[in-house]
Image (cartoon, helix red, strand yellow):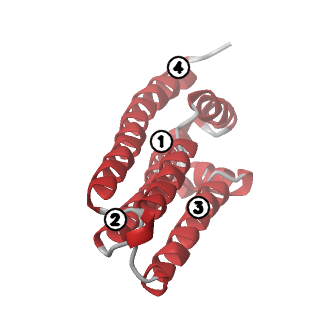
Amino acid sequence: MINDTESDARRRVAAVHRTSRIIVLAMAASTVIYIAIGLAIAPEAGEAADQRKIIPFLVAALLLAFASLVVRRVQFGRGRLEWVAHKRGVEALIKHFFTTTLIASALAEAIGVLGLLIGFLGGSQMEVVSLGVIAFTMTLSTYPRRAAWEQVVDHFAATLPRQALSNTDRKEALP
């Protein structure tokens, strides 16, 4: 059964999820725009620039993709979520979901920006499209999962002391 505190938390999760969803979808749409602009300015494969100029951008894209995955994985790990909930409360946990989603999707979108830069530097259309597709896929992988957020928030709303649900400083709620 859902009590008032859990239902308030669910309403807050719904609002934050809606905002997160809009931001992630906007970032995914921007990667499509980057691909389109990159295709318009990048030369065909036969006319592409020296590959030595492009390799640092490809390495940076690889690192950004890895960073996006790691940030999401670490920040949404059980231990981290427990720490945030116990130290800062359920409201901070909801903010943590939003912030982590925003950071992970921004890292993924940056891959699309690198693809666009490759296009400006004379990289081939294939390189622009490749990085754009990777950026789009990585951005969509950060799409917020509302049911999972609600499940975690419901758990902590039910188990944390009443005062800790919205405290920014959990010390007041501890004996």
Q: Is residue 61 above or below residue 161?
A: below
User: Going from the N terminus, do you reach mark 3 or mark 4 first?
Assistant: 4
SS of the residue at dot 4? helix
The residue under label 1 is: 91
Residue visible at 40% across and 37% down? Answer: 25
Q: Are marks 1 and 4 in contact (CB under 8 Å)?
A: no
Q: Residue furthest top?
A: 1
10 Å crowding of disc 1: few (<14), some (14-19), many (20+) = many
The residue under label 3 is: 71
Q: Nearer the viewer, mark 1 or mark 3?
A: 3
The residue under label 4 is: 7
| Front residue of this view, candidates 108 and 77 | 108
User: Going from the N terminus, do you reach mark 1 or mark 4 first?
Assistant: 4
10 Å crowding of disc 4: few (<14), some (14-19), many (20+) = some
The residue under label 2 is: 43
Q: Are marks 1 and 3 in contact (CB under 8 Å)?
A: no
Q: Nearer the viewer, mark 2 or mark 3?
A: 2
Q: Are marks 2 and 1 in contact (CB under 8 Å)?
A: no
